[in-house]
Amino acid sequence: MIQRNPVNEHHMTLMERMRVLSEGTKYDSCNQSAVCHAFGPDGRCIQLYKTLMTNSCSGECTYCPNRCGRDSVRASLSPEEIVKITWSFYRRNAIEGLFLSSGVMGDSERTAEKQLEVARLLRGQGFTGYIHIRVMPGTPKYLLEEIADCANKFGVNAETTSSMNYSEICPNFDYRNDVLQRLQWTRDLINKKRREAGSRGRIIGANDTQFVVGALQESDREIIGTVEKFMDQYELRRPYFMSFDPVPFTPLENNEPSPQWRETRLYQTSYLLKDYGLTANDLDHVLDDNGFLCNADPKMLLASCRPDMFPVDINSASREELLTVPGIGPVGANRIIQSRPIASEKELARMGVVLARARPFIEINGKKQTNLFSFAGVGA
């Protein structure tokens, strides 16, 4: 049964309900405010109105502030109210779209039906902005297909790395059937919609999911390995990581919070997997004996532990070699190759190379860094 506090909810203003539901998105991809930043399907950073439909939930996820049975203020918004609020923000150019999640309203099917109603109302009223729907584990395939007709992006959160872990923190759902099967269906629907849309249709975002970092004792090695597997099997483009922060009156309230830097380092390793062509095995070099990352840039650590590979000659190195250099990303590597020969650091800086990071690992026309501040001729 859905927990609901009718006294609180019925005496709350619309603004108070909006605040409660924005705060209730604690474990949904971006920050806890009504307007948040996210990356759209075209790679741009965009602003979204982010909300739950309700923070009443039949689920018993052990880390979640919205779990069933927890004594807290409950609130909800009707599909019509969410549509009205979205239009209000959109017409003032405060947002470019909507991120819609929810507590589980009885079951996943009913929840998805309500989320779909929001998307259909918006599209039916001529809304051309971005719609991202975070569906619940176990959402039926037919509803995913209908959501795919309206949304730019949709997906389900994995939260953790295995069935055993998932059963411990999300006891109402089955990892293999309710999560992994939905990731596969989402992958297939995204590919289908992209083929149908061609170059002129609605932009469809890539598959994504989210991990709660630190709720359990799983290592970073496990998380990195799972991200690599999801990239291969489900064409995962962007994993999100949310640091665990214990919530009072939940089963994990006495657990230690996960440091924010761990979330940051996992993002950096995911970029190395996605954009730099590294494998999970390559990243073993930056893990400690227990399989955890330290609070240092993993790309810098990889470079530092392979001194035989450096310095890299900017004017003759392959793209793969350039990508091993801290401070040079995929865009910078492409610009270097297109612009060679390169004669100076200033040229590299104009291409987006972070020279403060790259200097110890490169040489330009036979000159390389001999101390923290200068380049010198080879042999000097």
Image (cartoon, rainbow, N blue to C red):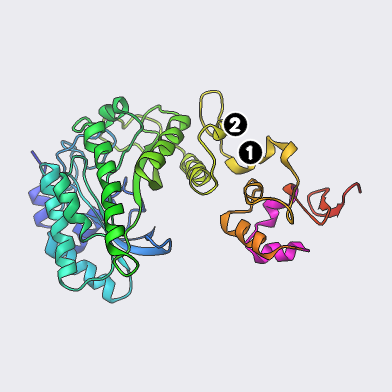
Q: For the residues marked 1 and 2, what is the alpha-carbon distance in whole angstroms? A: 8 Å
**For the residue labelled by badge 1, is the local secondary structure a helix, a strand or a loop?**
helix
The circle on residue 301 is: 1
Q: Is residue 291 above or below residue 67?
A: above
Q: Contact (CB < 8 A) between labels 1 and 2?
A: yes
Mark 1 crowd level (few <14, some 14–19, many ≥20, 10 Å Cα): some
Mark 1 belongs to which amino acid? Leu
Q: Of helix, strand and loop, which mostly describes the magenta segment?
A: helix
- Expressed as whole percent of the image width and height from the top left, the position of residue 140 reads 15, 44
User: Mark 1 or mark 2: which is in front?
Assistant: 2
Q: Which residues are magenta?
A: 343-360
- Expressed as whole percent of the image width and height from the top left, the position of residue 183 reads 29, 42
Instruction: Give the residue drawn at x 30%, y 76%.
Output: 92
Q: Is residue 342 above or below residue 142?
A: below
What residue did someone put label 2 on? 285
Q: Tell whether position 355 is magenta.
A: yes
